[in-house]
């Protein structure tokens, strides 16, 4: 039990570090454009980090919890993964490198699990009993590398997470580029951009309406009223936000051509508050869930290794990992998400000024126009990846979005020397974290 409590405390410390390490993602552009002072910006971002508690589900948490097979690892594996993630996060923060806290955690978890498998089984095959059937496995099968999606849905596993090292920033760059081109055309006195905008508004409303969960399918309605239960269902809130973001920008696009430069800039600065808030929500929802997943995995491993029946555990530790194949629904005590969202919000309040400088000025010069486009693109990317339960890097996403905005001016507007350095940090994060976690695991095994 002591080791489990240490892991929970360290996981929350990692969540706090994640907050100040990644604070730059949400506040860099609003600070660079002087919409908010640094203190106001972190306060704004922290508030929406915490607000994500009421918006997002536990899809990403479930994915992270299943990075390694919890029936084959022990608590030392999870402890090593968290310690390695904390070390790498602090090193990259100290150097001002906007690396991914998400990939650090997943790389550490996977690396420690592989070290455990090698320690127990060597490089030989071994057999395990699962559901009364013996299966032959290789040492590397301890990590969930790839699992096909149920009913043709989104696949999961470490391979998918690695793929999104490339896909998340590309998606962010593409969306921010499209938003920028759209708004640039909307600034001209032409009827075609306005027709496009009206069409986009209609399609967005139709699409979001189709994503709504009706009252009959809500497992635990929050209100007796059907209307308010639908409005405040977490899944629905997320899609309401998507609609609100798109409709807000669309409204601005419709009036953009009638505004002079000064008025347009004033409106864009106010819109930056909206886009920054939207991105902070996505950041809180995406990154806090990863720590929830680690805590859930730790509890599941403790139950397995201690032989304690889950019903004999204190109520605050009764965590159940979902299993779609067996029809088991996950369960998590409320204190876990509440603690994780609080930790990341407090971390964001602490700020990460070294990384703010890199994100806000070194990649490309950011104005209010670029800030709105980049943060909106980043927020939409995070919302959609969270919908598909894919843990992505908020750092990679916003960096790609800023690059996409820079490309609308000219290719040379992006400082590619800085960008290439960031790419190397992204590529190396998972393997370096995995190796570091392996070393930490073998050191811990001497004492535990």
Image: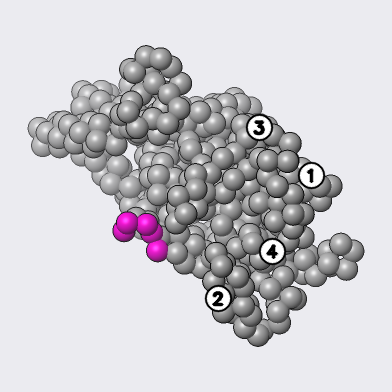
Disc 3/disc 1 C-alpha distance (Å): 14 Å
Disc 3/disc 4 C-alpha distance (Å): 25 Å
Q: Which residue is the site of mark 2?
A: 135
Q: Which residue is the site of mark 3?
A: 335
Point out the frontmost of discs 3 and 2: 2
Q: Tell me whether the residue at label 1 lies in contact with that at label 2, contact meaning CB atoms closer than 8 angstroms.
A: no
Q: Position of residue 74 (x, y in %)?
A: 73, 61
- Mark identifier at residue 5: 1
Q: Secondary structure at mark 3?
A: helix
Q: Position of residue 315 (x, y in %)?
A: 69, 34
Q: Nearer the viewer, residue 170 or 389?
A: 389
Q: Position of residue 288 (x, y in %)?
A: 59, 41
Disc 1/disc 4 C-alpha distance (Å): 17 Å
Q: Tell me whether the residue at label 3 lies in contact with that at label 1, contact meaning CB atoms closer than 8 angstroms.
A: no
Of the two numbered discs 3 and 1 on the same chain, state the one appearing first in sequence: 1
Quadrant placement of the C terminus: bottom right
Q: Secondary structure at mark 2?
A: strand
Disc 2/disc 4 C-alpha distance (Å): 17 Å
Vertical relation: 210 (above or below) 396? above
Q: Which residue is the site of mark 4?
A: 73
Identify which residue is drawn at 50% across, 53% down. 323
Numbered range of the magenta stretch:
148-152
Point out the frontmost of discs 2 and 4: 2
Q: Residue furthest top?
A: 225
Task: Kindly report the secondary structure that dominates the magenta region of the rendered protein.
Answer: helix
Is residue 356 at least partly visible in the picture?
A: no
Disc 1/disc 2 C-alpha distance (Å): 33 Å
Disc 1: CA contacts within 10 A as few (<14), some (14-19) or many (>=20): few
């Amino acid at each position: 039990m002591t080791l489990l409590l240490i892991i929970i405390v360290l996981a929350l410390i990692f969540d706090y570090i994640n907050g100040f390490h990644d604070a730059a993602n949400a506040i860099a552009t609003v600070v660079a454009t002087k919409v908010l002072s640094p203190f106001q910006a972190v306060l704004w971002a922290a508030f929406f980090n915490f607000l994500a508690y009421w918006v997002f589900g536990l899809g990403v948490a479930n994915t992270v919890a299943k990075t390694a097979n919890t029936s084959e690892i022990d608590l030392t594996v999870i402890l090593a993964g968290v310690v390695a993630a904390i070390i790498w996060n602090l090193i990259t923060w100290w150097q001002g490198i906007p690396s991914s806290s998400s990939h650090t955690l997943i790389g550490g978890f996977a690396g420690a699990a592989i070290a455990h498998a090698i320690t127990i089984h060597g490089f030989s095959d071994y057999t395990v009993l699962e559901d009364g059937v013996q299966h032959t496995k290789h040492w590397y099968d301890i990590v969930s590398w790839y699992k096909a999606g149920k009913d043709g849905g989104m696949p999961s596993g470490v391979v998918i997470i690695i793929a999104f090292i490339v896909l998340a920033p590309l998606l962010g760059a593409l969306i921010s580029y499209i938003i920028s081109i759209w708004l640039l055309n909307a600034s001209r006195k032409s009827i075609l951009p306005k027709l496009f905008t009206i069409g986009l508004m209609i399609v967005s409303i139709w699409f979001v309406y189709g994503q709504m969960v009706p009252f009959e399918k809500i497992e635990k309605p929050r209100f007796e009223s059907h209307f308010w239960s639908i409005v405040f269902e977490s899944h629905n809130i997320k899609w309401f936000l998507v609609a609100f973001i798109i409709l807000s920008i669309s409204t601005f696009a419709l009036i953009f051509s009638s505004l002079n430069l000064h008025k347009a800039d004033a409106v864009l600065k106010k819109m930056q508050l909206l886009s920054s808030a939207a991105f902070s929500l996505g950041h809180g929802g995406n990154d806090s869930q990863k720590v929830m997943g680690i805590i859930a995995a730790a509890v599941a491993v403790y139950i397995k290794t201690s032989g304690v029946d889950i019903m004999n555990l204190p109520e605050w530790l009764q965590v159940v990992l979902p299993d779609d194949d067996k029809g088991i629904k996950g369960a998590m005590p409320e204190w876990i998400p509440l603690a994780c969202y609080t930790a990341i919000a407090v971390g964001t309040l602490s700020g990460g000024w070294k990384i703010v400088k890199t994100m806000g000025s070194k990649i490309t010069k950011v104005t209010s126009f670029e800030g709105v486009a980049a943060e909106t693109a980043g927020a939409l990317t995070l919302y959609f990846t969270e919908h598909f339960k894919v843990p992505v890097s908020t750092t990679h996403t916003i960096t790609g979005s800023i690059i996409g905005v820079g490309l609308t001016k000219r290719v040379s507007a992006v400082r590619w020397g800085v960008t290439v350095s960031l790419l190397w940090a992204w590529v190396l994060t998972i393997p370096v974290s995995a190796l570091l976690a392996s070393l930490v695991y073998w050191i811990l095994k001497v004492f535990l």
